[in-house]
Image (spheres, grey):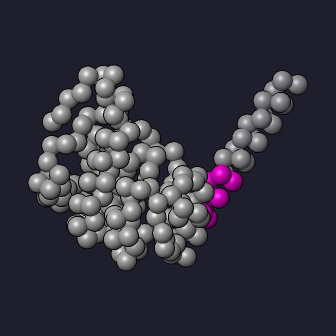
Amino acid sequence: MTKYPTQELKNKRKTHVLFMSTEAMKNIFELGYPFEFYEASHQFAIHSPIGVIDYFAISGTWVVRKGQDRGKGIRKMKQYIKNKVGDIMEKVKVVKCAGYLDKDGNITNQIKKAMHFTDGELANLAASVAGGKVVNVVIPPEKPKQLLEKVKEESFQEKTKKKTKSNQSWMTKK
């Protein structure tokens, strides 16, 4: 594992992280599962048979989001990536995802503009990630609609809760 002095690490972090993401992207693509890539956090959401697996390229951390097999499958996948990439994953602070990656390669917080990859688009994505641009991305119509409805419901519930709280406090003051 390469170790940089602090100042040098700060200077090289951007290219280093991009390199790690590109390497991880190539190898995750070889696994053959559909995945989503979030540029802000250099995070990969891999849709595998054992559930959604989050892989943080900056820290080399793996998280199983759902699914019963949290051991065998993920260990197998980790070993596969390690054999391909080696010990280049450096322990750097994981940055929380600021949004989704849209089809122009920019970060957006609107889920309907976010990319949802199909198997055919993964080759193109793996090839173009180093340049930060992705072309020919098709958004499946069903998935974003369901997610949008969920988001709308949550925000509506929050608004109503806030209103009742403010009304109660106003009444107690009087």
Image point 22% across, 66% down: which residue?
A: 31
Dividing the picture into quarters, in which one does residue 44 lie?
Answer: bottom left
Q: Position of residue 26 (x, y in %)?
A: 26, 61
Is 66 contained in the magenta span? no
In the depicted structure, whether residue 144 falls above or below residue 6: below
Q: Position of residue 174 (x, y in %)?
A: 88, 25
Dividing the picture into quarters, in which one does residue 13 lie?
Answer: top left
Q: Which residues are magenta?
A: 148-156
Left or right side of 173 for 57: left
Q: Nearer the viewer, residue 145 or 37?
A: 37
Q: Nearer the viewer, residue 78 or 3?
A: 3
Q: Is residue 17 visible?
A: yes
Quarter of the picture holding the N terminus: top left
* Residue found farthest to the right: 174
In the depicted structure, whether residue 33 falls above or below residue 20: below
Image point 17% across, 52% down: which residue?
A: 85
Q: Position of residue 125 (x, y in %)?
A: 38, 65
Left or right side of 20 for 163: right
Image point 18% across, 34% down: which residue?
A: 2
